[in-house]
Amino acid sequence: MTKYVVDTNLYVDATRSPHWNQALAGFQRRFAPLLHQHSTVAQEILSGARDRAGYRALYDRWVAPFEQLDRVYTPTHASWKRAALIVTRLVEKGRVSPGAFARSFLNDCLIAASARDEGFTLVTRNLRDFDLVSEVEPGFRFVEPWPER
């Protein structure tokens, strides 16, 4: 059975829009036993806090439930190396310029590499970056919101 990781952009959408919040909550209810959180996604979510109270609210809502279920995946050293190789391959192919990419793209490469290693499918709206990554990372799977069973 497919295991899923939800990308940061969908949590951000859920905090900004009741529609996206309901959509994410519905997905989480339907797929609860198959959902995991990536520690990079947790870091990106928590980095959006403006103060400690905001950090606590984000943590309680979006991170703590996965920690309580022991469903947070932290990339291995091999995944970090694979993420760097993804960037190298894209530079080599002329698809990205050396050093001319955002830190968030490096995070995306790490999420993709470790999702592939762990057999997760990423649920994301960021098709542009992940289409690019998939050009050089065979076996990485991602889908648009919201997949059906």
Image (cartoon, rainbow, N blue to C red):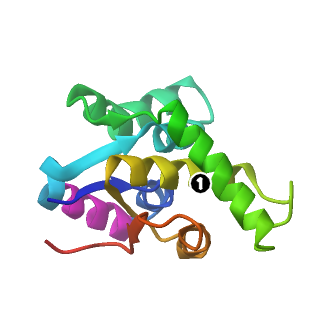
Q: Is residue 86 left or right of residue 23?
A: right
Name the residue beneath numbered marker 1.
109
Residue 69 rendering spot, x and y as whole percentages: 20, 31
Residue under the image location 34 percent in, 46 percent down: 118
Q: Residue at x 34, y 70 (%)?
A: 19
Say if the magenta span includes residue 108: no
Residue 32 horizontal/vertical position (percent): 16, 50
Asked if residue 97 lies left or right of residue 138, the reply is right
Percent across and percent down for residue 28 are 22, 55
On-image quarter of the C terminus: bottom left
Q: Residue at x 29, y 44 (%)?
A: 36
- Dominant secondary structure of the magenta stretch? helix
Give the percent coordinates (x, y) of residue 18.
36, 65
For the N terminus, the quadrant is bottom left
Instruction: Work out whether residue 2 or residue 144 is closer to the camera in this orientation and state it.
Output: 2
> From which residue to which does the magenta span run?
18-28
Q: Kindly tell me whether residue 48 is visible in this rendering.
A: no
The residue at the point 72 percent across, 66 percent down is 90
Whether 37 is drawn above or below 24: the answer is above
* CA neighbours of label 1 inside 10 A, class few (<14), some (14 to 19), many (20+): many
